[in-house]
Image (cartoon, helix red, strand yellow):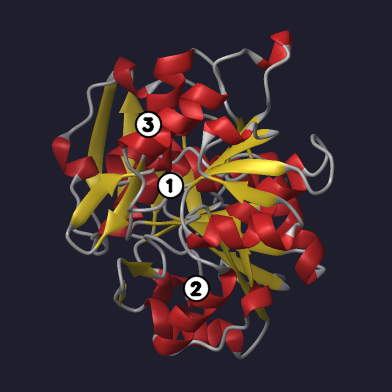
Amino acid sequence: MSLFTRSRRTPLSDVDVVLADLDGVVYAGAGAIPYAIDSLKQVEATRRLGYITNNASRTDASVAAHLSELGLTVAPDEVVTSPQAAMRLVSGLIPAGSTILVVGGEGLVHEVRKAGFEVTRSADDAPAAVVQGFAPEVGWSDLAEAAFALKVPENEGGIPWIATNTDWTIPQSRGVAPGNGTLVSAVHTAIGRLATVAGKPETPIFEEAVARFGAKHPLFIGDRLDTDIAGASRAGIESALVLTGIDRPKHVLAAAEGQRPTYILGDLRELHEPYPEVKVTGDTVTVRDAAVRVDGVDVTILREGDRPIDLVRAGAEAIWRTGRQIFGFRVPERLYADPFHRP
């Protein structure tokens, strides 16, 4: 069955809780993404709205305050962070009250202490675990201390290493910057170990959110296929990819199975619009006035239609239905043109 068979139904139909990523969905840096706030205020008026973030640099209270400044109504317990998911994991691995070497910022330190652990920044303090999360101030010396603490492999008696997330990049107001995955990779390169990941695309952070909000039919909104959409898929949650952050139309066309969203949105206004029906006739896929055909190795645009997002939807469905990877096709550049807002 096509992912896009619903007709005249919005992505919010039958949804009781909306869970939204932050960076690239609600804001980029300090500023709101166009149309995001008004669209989410409409959601607030009709159903529960929560936020899930892999960014470990801030506390849930500071995130809630930022969102409130942008015009939303958000309490701290409506923000689910990757440090909170990391504490769920680490609490089952080391004794209560142990010392943890923290690589990260205020958001991570806050959650470590709230969970009853001691914080250190030095491997010389014999930490029971290393927990690593993103913060702009993380530098070489922080990564070096993590490497020193993790020099013994875990299967040889070494301590656990938990990463809040492994997002390679993070959207900022000036562009795309290195994320926590880049910093985790630096430690991995030094020691040859892999971290256990608490945040997206792993399921602990989604399980925490579903439990906290009592969600029966949640919808998750994200901007990344490899973390947001893959994580929602693993957790059994329907998802919407919005093209206002990291991943672009070319990434959507190439999305692997397990990273394909239920809905593709140009911006969050489309949450409230009827989602178009996909019509399949032979090798041709039509979405509203846009039509794309796959003929052997050639992907052909038959009609561009009036809305660029419909062309992306038609092209994605046409390619996905073949079960083949995108590098086996000749794809016209027009199909992955990118008129959509991004930071």
Q: Which comes before the other along the chain, label 3 or label 1?
A: 1
Residue depth check, mark 3 versus mark 1: number of the one nearer the observer = 1
Above or below 268: residue 137: above
- Where does the image place residue 115, in percent across and percent down from the top left? 75, 57
Residue under the point 41% across and 17% down = 190
Residue depth check, mark 3 versus mark 2: number of the one nearer the observer = 2
Residue under label 3? 254
Residue under label 1? 224
Callout 3 crowding tier (Cα within 10 Å): few <14, some 14–19, many ≥20: some
Residue under the point 63% across and 13% down = 153
Residue under the point 56% across and 55% down = 108
Q: Secondary structure at mark 1?
A: loop
Q: Which comes before the other along the chain, label 1 or label 2?
A: 2
- Disc 2 marks a residue whose amino acid type is Val
Q: Which comes before the other along the chain, label 3 or label 2?
A: 2
**Mark 3 to mark 1 CA distance (whole Å):** 13 Å
- Where does the image place residue 119, in percent across and percent down from the top left? 61, 50
Q: Residue furthest top?
A: 156
Q: Secondary structure at mark 3?
A: loop
